[in-house]
Image: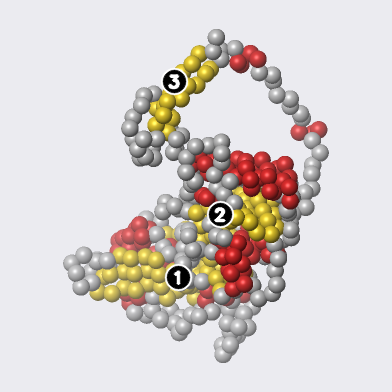
Amino acid sequence: MPKSTTIFLCSHCDAQYQKWIGRCLECGQWGTISESAVKKSETEKNKTAAAKTVSLDEIKGENTPRIATGLSELDRVLGGGIVPGSLILLGGEPGIGKSTLALQLATLISPTLYLSGEESVGQIKLRADRLFTKKINFRLGNETNVETICATITAEKPTLAVIDSIQTITSHDVLGEAGNPNQVRAATVKLLETAKSTNTAIVIIGHVTKEGTVAGPKTLEHLVDTVLYLEGERHHSYRLLRTVKNRFGATDEVGIFAMQEHGLVEVKNSSAAFIADRGEAVSGSILTCLMEGTRPMLVEIQALVNKTVFGYPVRKASGFDLNRLHVLVAVLEKRAGLSLGQYDIHINVVGGINAGEPAADLTVCLAIASSYKDKALGADLVVFGEVGLGGEVRRVSQAEKRIKESANLGMRRVITAASSTKNSTTVEINPNPKLSEGKNYDKSGLKIIGVKNIAELITHT
């Protein structure tokens, strides 16, 4: 006979308890705990048939053609285009441009079905008229029930379906209001089944919480085929599209867009874009070369060192980890002899970019030393390298690509770890015409300077 076990479930977050309590300890909701009976059969495992397996050599490979979106930056992130029948999650903070990117995608792939639970079809029409100057056409709808959405996709069989957003979708099979973890998970599972059965690529939009994750259960990211995050500062024009998960391609590529009046515009030469508005060389302003996926990108890092007016110095950072800044300041004081204890230090990464990789360490150190000594180091210098607690300078990955990108942008000097390259070597400069106006480039090439520790770096100031 089957054995019955009584448990108590939370209707909001699906947490389980052995006894009834008034408030869920997981989600903090009151009055959501209810009794549920679970039956377990002792002979169930004996009645289950074994699964059929095949040898890997017996399976014929399939070459599924991808759907080109027309946006090279998006295709780059997806691994060459959208795979038919895939489920793609597009996440990002409110107002960052998720719906704008999805609307642009809908205009580039035909036929497309755009279903919104947040905006009416009239509001979407107004936004489309504002963004696009040419005449566009795709099918729109307002629906929040996932069963109806799946039936519509099955009936119309579009190439692409966009769901905006997953937090507004509900299912008849699950209790609770829209946006709770159970509803989000159930809706995603049914959309995944529909995508596989109809061979329709589905893009679902998800909002990001304060913690930086998609609102809803973390299992949502495990259900979908691809997870994309649109990042950037709302007050800056640049947006970075990152791949967190991709079953059909690599996860180390990044697409760069600029938010303009008519939507998101691709930024194909990111280095030139980020340093195009750079002014005259001032103290504390140094260029670094970051790697976003396989793409090198020149970014300006600024430092401002000023005498503190309070007893405790202030440390602030925008686009750079504040804890890492404290470590680098301590290394400069201990290993390079800079007395920074009575100075406020401010770090800014220009363009709203987040300089999270270790290659920016050396640049931040030199920018702080330059501002401390109030000495400009020129606009043709690029610095990258990791700094250890002993003051040693360590090499970073793909140094050759970083050096080549610096040469292509017309830079004259590169300072990096001595272990990455030989001292006083040169490479040929291929200056960018737009960035080299009014500059006389000789044939001496780009000079590569290797430093072993932070004390050697300070000598260049």
Residue 227 vertical placement versus 40 (above, below):
below
- SS of the residue under disc 1: loop
Q: Quadrant of residue 431?
A: bottom right
The crowd level at tag 3 (other Cα within 10 Å; few <14, some 14-19, many 20+) is: few
User: Residue at point 41% right, 29% down?
Assistant: 34
Q: Does 389 sit left or right of 446 as displayed?
A: left
Mark with earlier residue (2, 3): 3
Residue 14 or residue 411, whichever sits in front: 14
Residue furthest out toward the bottom: 438
Q: Amino acid at mark 2?
A: Gly
- SS of the residue under disc 2: loop
Q: Which residue is disc 2 drawn over? A: 117
Give the Cα distance between marks 3 and 1: 53 Å
Give the Cα distance between marks 2 and 1: 27 Å
Q: Position of residue 140 (x, y in %)?
A: 65, 59
Q: Which residue is disc 1 drawn over? A: 235
Mark with earlier residue (2, 1): 2
Mark with earlier residue (3, 1): 3
Q: Amino acid at mark 3?
A: Thr
Q: Which residue is disc 3 drawn over? A: 6
Q: Position of residue 177 (x, y in %)?
A: 47, 43
